[in-house]
Image (spheres, rainbow, N blue to C red):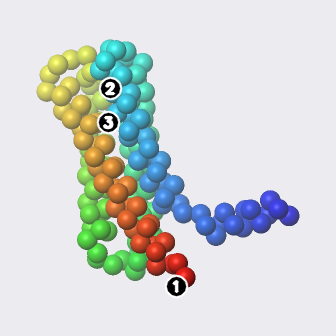
Amino acid sequence: MAGRSLLEEMKKTFLFHAIAAHFSNGLIPVAVLYLLLTLSTGSIYFEHTVEHLIVIVLMAVPVSFFSGVHDWKKKYRGAKAPVFIKKIRLSALLFLLCASAVAIRLTIPEVMTGQGIEHWLYLALLFSMLPVVTLLGHYGGKLSSQSRQASKPA
């Protein structure tokens, strides 16, 4: 019986968008950490981890985006508040940065061993994803905080 009430409670409080957003937002800092390890050690194994992480992020960002749009329409009735527009734009930017990084890495497997423009562009794309997810988390936290404030009894 206790297991059933736990499942019912989880169902009532389950926030799919929050889970999806934290998933990709957590992997990008890890990818940047492994990129720094790659740069400092030259280890191809660390760089392969970066590749795997950004491919996973590329698949996760659309899930986070569409679940966020769903919540926005359901909870906030699609309000055109600046915070939502910023989150939509940042999500699109994140997807473009990640897709570009994945495209470079998959088409030029040796990109990290070279010193050409592709190498520097790849690094710039990876590093630029970090402030984007930071801002996405910041705005998401503001929305979550406002939501908790509004639901508190007076």
Work out how far the residue at label 2 is from the one at label 1, CA to CA, in angstroms: 48 Å
Marks 2 & 3, CB-CB < 8 Å contact:
no
Q: According to the image, label 1 marks what residue?
A: 154
Q: Residue at x 26, y 71 (%)?
A: 82
Callout 2 crowding tier (Cα within 10 Å): few <14, some 14–19, many ≥20: some
Work out how far the residue at label 1 is from the one at label 3, CA to CA, in angstroms: 49 Å
- Image location (x, y in percent) of residue 2: 82, 62
Q: According to the image, label 3 marks what residue?
A: 102
**Amino acid, disc 1:** Ala
Q: According to the image, label 2 marks what residue?
A: 36
- Image location (x, y in percent) of residue 88: 30, 62
Position of residue 81 relative to residue 58, above or below, is: below
Q: Is residue 49 visible?
A: yes
**Amino acid, disc 3:** Val
Callout 1 crowding tier (Cα within 10 Å): few <14, some 14–19, many ≥20: few
Work out how far the residue at label 2 is from the one at label 3, CA to CA, in angstroms: 17 Å
SS assignment at label 2: helix
